[in-house]
Image (cartoon, coloured by chain):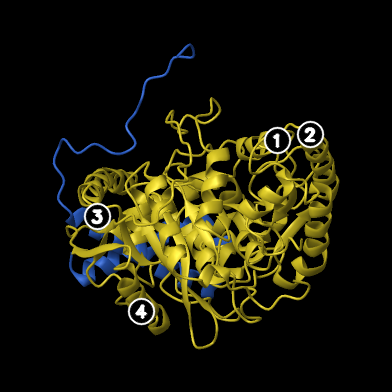
Amino acid sequence: MNPVFQTVRELAEAVRARRLSPVALAETVLARLETLGPRYNAVVTVTRQRALVQARRAEDEIAAGHWRGPLHGIPYGAKDLLATAGGIPTTWGAAPLREQRFDFDATVVRRLEEAGAVLVAKLAMVELAGGMGYRQPNASFTGPGISPWGTGAWSGGSSSGSGSAVAAGLVPFAIGSETWGSILSPAASCGVTGLRPTYGRVSRHGAMALCWTLDKLGPLALTADDCGLVLDAIAGPDPHDSTAADRPFRYDEADVDGRRFRFGVVRDVAATAEPAVREAFARSLDALAKIGTVDEVTLPDLPYEAITRTILMAEAASAFEDMIESGAIAGLTAPEDHFTAYARDTILAKDYLRAQRLRGLVVREADRVLSRLDALVAPGRPGVASPLDREFRSAARGNVADLMGAIGNAAGLPAIAVPNGFSEAGLPTSLQFMGRAWEENTILAAARAWQGITDFHRRHPPVEGR
Amino acid sequence: MSPARDAVEVDLLLALVRHRYGDRLTGEQIEALRRGVQTIAEHAAALRAAPLTNADEPLPPFTPFRVDE
């Protein structure tokens, strides 16, 4: 079989039935990463040696009758903020850290290894996950991430390579991180599915810290089903991360045929989105009526975006205090990253604390609304992929509204972005389902139902060698 | 807060940035930082305008620690 653009579930069935060799699969993926990865600036390091060792082990184990589960023998890429042992660099996308190495694997990487997955690449990302205030796509020492859907289109950030590598069929799934938008944005810009788990669902041990109270790790893949399979492997408590919750998670694969969902939509949530996004969202609301009800909901008037942005800027300024105060940020790629963070010295402690106090209201109000729903729906990103050569609009910077991102990240709520259309220029648009805390299975079911009545997730960009 | 007081506050906060980092900054960068400080001041004003009670604690709550638990 040609494994390119096959889902994790399809690949897993072939591997388990020994119709597909994990070693051959790894070789295919490694070759694509090496030849096509540079086209999208998607890859920092191809981990060929480690991949082939893991793939051979998987092949031997499966041949001996020991199948670990659906990720056994399946290749994946990890955003390059996840620590990896064995001399593999972990650069955080930052030129001054291009030789940084760790002597341990991040918990997520270790869990995926235990599940039998094969690490084939460390994937490109915006430097320091965008924490220094970048304003345009050229903000990584590996170059601006490029969406496979358009040569002049940004892949989104900060999990740029995680989005583009999945979209281009370079890996079946990838791990990204989100503080505010960094999984949903590249998923949207690259036309793939991205799952932001509940804060604390996945251990962040070994992941670069940008904002301790906002950072989440999650999968990007072709389908919601694949995201569920990956989350099943990486979720769970971890003695090395006190925020990793002691709440068991098992992916619920139950058939969603005939299931009716209760969706909510915040009034005017797409009002400031680009026309193509607004139009796709309007069509999506009509289509969602096939699988459930859609009711308008209201939220109290709170400064949602100021809350999340203040927390993000203050914590990032602290997390990278050494680099900022030493002036090491002058070695970053984006010119604006050389100095923008200096302004954050003016955030007062009492304003950060006020933001954290108001966050308590956000958490309660969001749960009040979501307790009566299966999910809130909204555009996954307010625009299609931005041009590479221009400043983009960013909710984290405050020049575009992102109510859902502000609430969802402040409240630590799970959300999944799925493709829902294309602009006239052929760039993907996206729909998000945001759920109650710890309700990943509910939003995964809703997203699976969506992908059962649409085919956007089965469309792929024109990449050679399919 | 009036626009005039806002402007004074931004000037004062920017003076702190210039004091700490001015020797590394160009005039263009300082003007960009003025916009950044202005945004931070606007966020602070928005936060302060939202009502809170004495009982509204910051998240996440503090938790005592024991190595054996």
Whether discs 3 and 2 lie on one chain: the answer is no
Q: CA distance from mark 4 to mark 1?
A: 45 Å
Which residue matches tag 1?
Answer: A67
Whether discs 1 and 3 lie on one chain: the answer is no
User: Mark 4 sits on what residue?
Assistant: A278
Q: Give the letter of the chain under mark 3.
A: B
Please state which of residues A201 and B3 is positioned toward the viewer in this rendering: A201
Are discs 2 and 1 less than 8 Å apart at CB? yes
Q: Amino acid at mark 2?
A: Glu
Q: Viewed as shown, does residue A236 lie left or right of A440?
A: right
The answer to whether residue A234 is left or right of residue A407 is right
Residue A209 visible, this orientation: no
| Residue picked out by circle 3 | B47
Mark 4 secondary-structure assignment: helix
Mark 1 and mark 3: Cα distance apart in space: 53 Å
Q: Chain of mark 2?
A: A
Mark 2, secondary structure of its residue: helix
Q: Nearer the viewer, mark 4 or mark 2?
A: 2
Colour in which the image shows chain A: yellow
Q: Quadrant of residue A338?
A: bottom right
Pointer 4 with pointer 1, Cβ within 8 A: no
Q: Colour of chain B?
A: blue
Q: Nearer the viewer, mark 1 or mark 3?
A: 1
Kindly identify the amino acid type of the residue bearing the numbered disc 4: Arg
Residue A82 lies in quadrant: top right
Do the residues bearing badges 4 and 2 touch, measured as CB atoms within 8 Å?
no
Task: Please tell me whether mark 3 or mark 2 is closer to you in this view.
Answer: 2
**What chain letter is assigned to the residue under label 1?**
A
Tell me how far mark 2 sits from mark 1, CA to CA: 7 Å
Location of residue A284 in the rendering, given as x and y in whole percent from the top left corner: 36, 73
Q: Could you tell which of marks 2 and 1 lies nearer the N-terminus?
A: 2
The residue that appears at 76% across and 61% down in the rendered structure is A1
